[in-house]
Every structure is written in structure tokens, then in C-alpha cells.
Amino acid sequence: MQCIDLRRKRGLVVGIANEHSLAWSAARQCHEAGADIAVTYLSEKAHRFVEPLAQQLGATIFLPCDVAKPGELEAVFRAVEEKWGRLDFLLHSIAWARKEDLHGRLVDCSADGFAESMLISCHSFIRMARLAEPLMSNGGSLMTMSHYGAEKVVDHYNVMGPVKAALEASVRYLAHELGRKSIRVNAISAGAVATRAASGIEHFDELLNESARKAPLRRTVRSEEVGRAALVLASDFASAITGEILHVDAGFHVEGMVFH
């Protein structure tokens, strides 16, 4: 029986906040498959939560990365180049919006708030793709995290809906532009999972309950299931998959306006 083997592959995971993060599940799955993992943390406050996880991965690259701070993202990629000389896969799992914009109506979102959310949640992935491109001379896999709210209206998702829609469109355009270099670009549209990021969404418990009620599998998803999807996309088993929005949501996205 064949199994996924990431030995001799090197990946960068951006967006681990704690042990509940989807990025942590993905990093752990890839590490267990043999990959070397580089890890970042957002701030000194986050450092104490992420450092023990990086140690579990044996991460030899562990650096701060706030994409809103000039130079920090570039420093991470310089470290990857100096330490490894190449990069085989990358997972972007960061999103941010001002509290008043995340909890308020889209129509009331400020221009500055919208721009900040786009820069941090969407354009940062484009920046990472540009920095990763020269390190993926033999091809590679770029991945990001999305949500069904990019496709249809999800109550209380608010400004993150159009921001994630832009992210998914960026996945398609990056796949088109980088495909000739054998660099694959995909997004994982994860179902409702209780993470630190999700806790910022108002009435998130209602979304969890609705997901379990409406999804064909009649349950929510587990973080390790999202992590396994990232593992597959990072591997050669997904060598012909690019430009895809892979739904890992127990089938929630297929239900539309079906009433039970």
C-alpha cells in the first residue's frame, strides 16, 4: 500500500496561533509524513503558545512574522533560502479584520478597515507566492485557507466574505501564472472548526450547530481532517491539482437552499 511520503520535502507554515489552529494540524500531519517544517509566530504574545509546537516539529526555522510589519515576511524567506536553499510547499493560514468591521455590516465597513483586511488576509498570500517562486525551481505547492462565506452569504461572516472571495480568485490567477513552473496553487475551504480565529466571529456557536444540522455528513469537521487535506495537497499525490478550492466541510457547501 502506498502512503504519503514527504521525506526530503521542506515546507513553511504561516499562521499557527496555538494547538487548535488549522495550520498546526496541517504542520503536524506534514511533519509526521517526514517533511521539515519552518514555523512562524505573529508576536511575542503568541510566541509562548507557538514555541512548544515548533519544538514538537523539530523546526530549525522559527521566526516572527507579522505581514503588516515591513521586512518580517521577507526575513522569513531569506532564512529559508539560507538554511534550505529551496521550498517545496507553503501554507498560508492568516486572516484579520478590525473588530468593528468583523462584527458590523459590510455596508458600514470603512475604507481603511477593508484595505487592511485585504492586505493581511489576501495580498499577503500573493506576496508569499512571489517570494516562494524563486525557491520552487523544481515546482511546489502553495496553499491557503478559505471558507464557504467566500461563495455564499454566511451570517456574521461580514467583511471576511468579500476578502476570502478575493483570496479564492487570487488562487486561480496565481495557479494560471505559476503553473508553467510546476507550482500548484490551491485553497482549502474549511468547514466550521472551533479555532482562535473563528472565535472572533459573532454567534459562532450558531454556525457550528447549523453546519452539523445541514451538512450531508450531519456533523462538523475536525481540525485533523483539514490538516490531512493540506498533507495531500503538499504531496505528489496532488501533482495534477491546481487552481482548486477544496471543500473540507462535511459537504456543507453542496446543500444550498435545501430544507430538512
Image (tube, grey):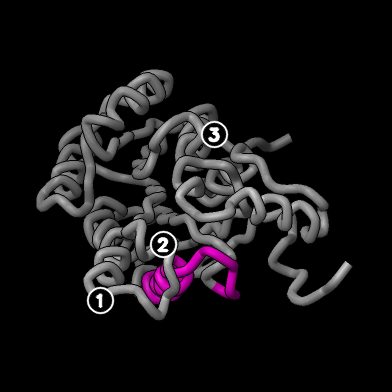
Quadrant for the C terminus in the image: bottom right
Labels 2 & 1 near each other (Cβ < 8 A) = no
- Magenta range: 151-175
- Residue 224 in the magenta stretch? The answer is no
Tell which residue pokes out farthest to the right in this image: 260
Disc 2/disc 1 C-alpha distance (Å): 13 Å
Viewer-proximal residue among 72 and 159: 159
Mark in front: 2 vs 3:
2
* Residue 130 position in % (x across, y down): 24, 62
Labels 2 & 3 near each other (Cβ < 8 A) = no
Residue 235 left/right relative to 132? right
Tell which residue pokes out farthest to the bottom in this image: 107
Q: Amino acid at mark 1?
A: Ala
Element assignment for label 3: helix
Residue 233: which disc?
none
Point 40% across, 56% down: residue:
142
Q: Amino acid at mark 2?
A: Leu
**Mark toward the start of the polypeptide (2 vs 1):** 2
Residue carrying label 3:
29
Disc 1/disc 3 C-alpha distance (Å): 39 Å
Disc 2/disc 3 C-alpha distance (Å): 31 Å
Point 22% across, 52% down: residue:
67
Residue carrying label 1:
111
Quadrant for the N terminus in the image: top right
Q: Amino acid at mark 3?
A: Gln
Point 35% across, 62% down: residue:
100
* Residue 23 position in % (x across, y down): 46, 41
Magenta span dominant secondary structure = helix
Residue carrying label 2:
102
